[in-house]
Amino acid sequence: MAGKRRWTFETAREMFPEVRRRTERAVEAAEALLAEREALPAGAPERADVDRRIQAEVGRWAREMEALGLEVKGLWLVDFDTGGGYYCWRWPEADLSFFHGYEEGFAGRTRIQ
């Protein structure tokens, strides 16, 4: 796709604190909504509204990550495309410490030395 962002390790590490901060905010919001949902009686119609709010929070986070130039690969999981593979990060990892090729995926990620 034209205009797709490519990351060096340096530029990915510079962006990482912002990615982590935004993800932490979204995780906290989603967890608060999950707690709200669990406090409702089973079968309560309000649960559907809370579920929609959770989905909206996750969707907002995903759009924010994509706007930063990252690829969202799962819930709280993003990849920084290097042009030869991905720097891979998943909440709550403290650092950007893993890489995987295009074919290996998350299961094939290795620690960056």
Image (cartoon, rainbow, N blue to C red):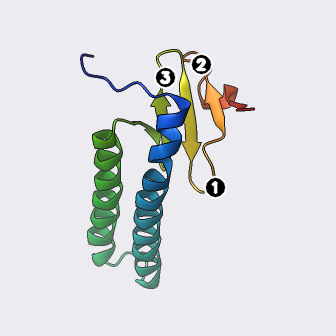
Residue drawn at x 28%, y 66% as measured from the top left: 53
Q: CA distance from mark 2 to mark 3?
A: 9 Å
Q: CA distance from mark 2 to mark 1?
A: 21 Å
Q: Is residue 111 above or below residue 32?
A: above
Query: Disc 2 marks which amino acid?
Result: Gly
Q: Earlier in the sequence, mark 2 or mark 3?
A: 3
Q: Is residue 41 above or below residue 56?
A: below
Q: According to the image, label 1 marks what residue? A: 94
In which image quadrant can residue 25 be found?
Answer: bottom left
- SS label for mark 1: loop
Q: According to the image, label 3 marks what residue? A: 82
Q: Is residue 45 left or right of residue 28?
A: left
Query: Disc 1 marks which amino acid?
Result: Ala
Q: State the residue in front, 43 or 110.
A: 110
Q: Earlier in the sequence, mark 1 or mark 3?
A: 3
Q: What crowding class fits label 1: few (fewer than 14 Cα within 10 Å), some (14-19), or many (20 or more)?
A: few
